[in-house]
Image: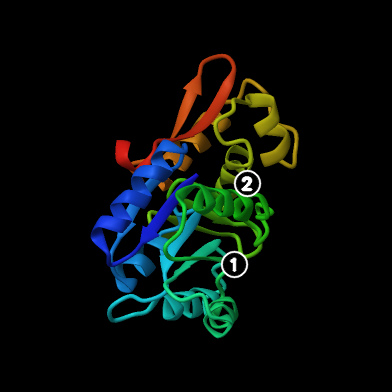
Amino acid sequence: MHVLVVDDEVRLAALVAEYLIGAGFSVEVSHDGVSALERIRGGSVDAVVLDHMLPGVSGLAVCRTLRAEHNSVPILLLTARGSVEERVEGLEAGADDYVVKPFAMEELVARLNALLRRVDVPADDRLVVGDVVLDLATRRLWVAGAEVATSRREFAMLSALMERAGRVVGRHVLFDEVWDEDVDINSNALDVYISRVRARLSGSDRVSVATLRGVGYRIDCRAADEA
């Protein structure tokens, strides 16, 4: 799981990031609301640890903006004051949960894990692999934040691969799910479409499609810090 930590307190953000990495998350850090929105809109963030008080665009404004855009990324809000009014304000703005500063790192991780367990993927009809987002309801594809056009079969092939991200998808499975008429299993049509899918994903330096000769294909994703 890839987590974005957003806090203008540089030292605290670094400490939170270090602890989350030790807990098994991949993490990146932002110190303001504008850059946080840009990263989240890119589609590669699985959850956000967001400070309530940020310079310029506040944490609450980030929450409201994302929810107005129908972005359902889980948000754990960090608040300096534990008043009922502030907690309610954060939840009404769109945060999913909150932690009051100062907090124990163990509680932060526990709440983040609980938040992620509640996420029903794909609750919003989206498949997400790294910085590649496939919207099943609107049949739209985004790669590294940019929308990319696809044909019907390219979309179907991406869907079949992304639903099984990290696992090998056999050629016969792809034929069954992508083609709605009889196609020779030895046809090179599948190889042609795999090449087209790779071209659609070329804007990502994290996501790729591997060929396992004689077996099938697998979509893989590297962590952001490995790209």
Contact check, label 2 and label 1, Cβ < 8 Å: no
Give residue 37's quadrant in the image. Answer: bottom left
Disc 2 secondary structure class = helix
Q: Which residue is mark 1?
A: 96
Give residue 4's quadrant in the image. Answer: bottom left
Amino acid on which disc 1 is placed: Asp
User: Crowdedness of circle 1 by 10 Å Cα count: few (<14), some, many (20+)?
Assistant: some
The residue closer to the viewer here, 151 or 205, is 205
- State the image coordinates of residue 57 (x, y, percent, origin top left): 34, 80
The residue closer to the viewer here, 2 or 193, is 2
- The residue at 59%/76% (across/down) is 91
> Earlier along the polypeptide chain: callout 2 or callout 1?
1
The residue closer to the viewer here, 51 or 177, is 51
- The residue at 57%/36% (across/down) is 165
- The residue at 60%/52% (across/down) is 116
Which of labels 2 and 1 is toward the front? 1
User: Crowdedness of circle 2 by 10 Å Cα count: few (<14), some, many (20+)?
Assistant: some
In this rendering, position of residue 118 left or right of residue 100: right
Disc number placed over residue 156 in the picture, else none: 2
